[in-house]
Image (tube, grey):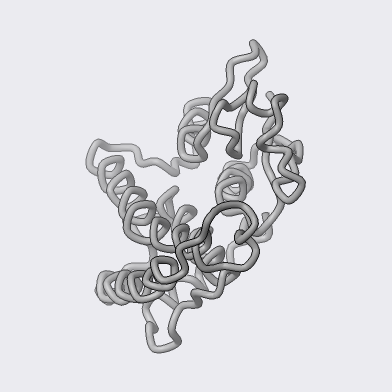
Amino acid sequence: MILYGERNPAPNPRRVRIFLAEKGIDLPETRVSMREREHKSPEHKARNSLGQLPTLELDDGTMISESVSICRYLEGIKPEPSLFGATPLEQATIDMWIRRVEFQLMTPIGMYWRHAHPFTAALLTQHKDFGESNRASTAAVLGWLDRELSDGRDYLAGDYSMADIVGQTTLDFADFVGLETPPDLTHVAAWRARMAARPSAAA
């Protein structure tokens, strides 16, 4: 197998690296430079027609894209330790939290990155007022997340799971783009500290 990805701060390739580290799977990442727009090259679009990262190439040439889908495939190859849940309830709860993070948090963070950050100004027509509006949207969702975590749980969906990996990489990317977690959100801060303390956080 060949994993095509990119270095930090790209959050989606990092999700897969953390997952691999937690699973103990040795699968080196072949870098596709986003700064040099290699992910939009004809060569990479032959792997992923959307020109996105990461992409996993199987030994028979099959391509799998989308970070969570790649990790689901790898979970099937190496089920333990389970990061997608063992029971129907665990699986549904983890899936719920993955979707919550992606839709409620990553969406406004991504829109801020695209429309308000100077690094992306040359890539599209920015609508800065819209971009800046996502700062408040992100803060509101972080407040909601802090309330959710106030019940004393250590992880988003019970035991440590893919939901935590998605959340960790999302908020680390938010820090990079300038949407830091407010310090008064102590429950989110404690959860983030637990994620940062795991050896896989270095991936």
Who's the residue at 56% across and 26% down the image? 49
Q: Residue at x 42, y 57 (%)?
A: 106
**From what the image shows, is residue 42 above or below residue 26?**
above
Quarter of image, res 91: top left
Q: Quadrant of residue 16?
A: top right
Image-quadrant location for residue 119:
bottom right
Which residue is at a point 43% across and 73% down the rendered structure image? Answer: 132
Towards the viewer: 166 or 46: 46
**Where does residue 118 sit, x and y in percent of width and height?**
62, 68
Q: Is residue 92 above or below residue 62?
A: below
> As drawn, is 194 to the left or to the right of 4?
left
Q: Nearer the viewer, residue 147 or 125?
A: 125
Residue 11 in the image: above or below residue 193:
above
Would residue 32 appear left or right of 129 to someone viewing this image? Answer: right
Q: Quadrant of the C terminus?
A: bottom right
Residue 104: x and y in percent read 32, 59
Is residue 152 rendered to the left or right of residue 30? left
Query: So how many labels did they put on this image?
Result: 0
Residue 169, given in percent of the width and then of the height, sits at: 53, 58
Tell which of 48 and 192 is nearer to you: 48
**Quadrant including the N terminus:** top right
Which residue appears at 31% of the width and 54% of the height?
100
- Say left or right for 117 vs 133: right
